[in-house]
Image (cartoon, rainbow, N blue to C red):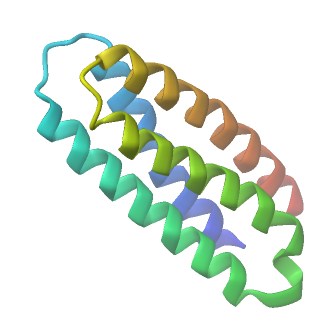
Amino acid sequence: MTVVLMLLEWAVGLVGGAAWTQSWSVVRRGHFRIVAWSALALGALALAAAFAEGAAATESRAMVVAVCAGCALFVAAQYLRSDVVGTVVGTATVVAGLGAMWALANLL
């Protein structure tokens, strides 16, 4: 469970930092695409770790899937022509991720 929580912290932190800096409209889109794909990879690793833990992680799987879905939406938002969409989707992903991390920390 600790590995899942650590990987989610990295993924949510990446998305949060990227969404915040994307709201400035200064950094080019390629940077956010790389960060979004990296966050999605970390979320996928967290999901794999949650499934590897077996029956002990049944409560955490739905939360990890929600964060992975948010990361996937953040990736998709980077291919649109508006920074606003990426900022909004990134912020929503961070809020969902913080809730998931809070719940996972309580399971430890």
Query: In the rendered image, which quarter is residue 15 located in?
Result: top left
Query: In the rendered image, which quarter is residue 22 located in?
Result: top left
The relative height of residue 47 versus residue 51 in the rendered view (above or below) is above
Q: Measuring from the top left, give residue 38's x and y in whole percent.
A: 32, 57
Q: Measuring from the top left, give residue 36's x and y in whole percent.
A: 34, 47
Q: Measuring from the top left, give residue 84's x and y in whole percent.
A: 38, 14
Residue located 16% across and 39% down the image:
31
Left/right of residue 6 with respect to residue 75 in the rendered view: right
Query: In the rendered image, which quarter is residue 8 located in?
Result: bottom right
The relative height of residue 107 versus residue 98 in the rendered view (above or below) is below
Residue located 38% across and 34% down the image:
77
- Between residue 106 and residue 22, name the one nearer to us: 22
Q: Is residue 51 visible?
A: yes
Quarter of the N terminus within the rendering: bottom right
Left/right of residue 64 with respect to residue 33 in the rendered view: right
Residue located 74% across and 48% down the image:
100
Q: Measuring from the top left, give residue 24's x and y in whole percent.
A: 25, 10
Q: Is residue 108 visible?
A: no
Left/right of residue 105 with respect to residue 95 in the rendered view: right
Residue located 68% across and 89% down the image:
52
The number of discs equals 0
Residue extending furthest toward the top: 24
Quarter of the C terminus within the rendering: bottom right
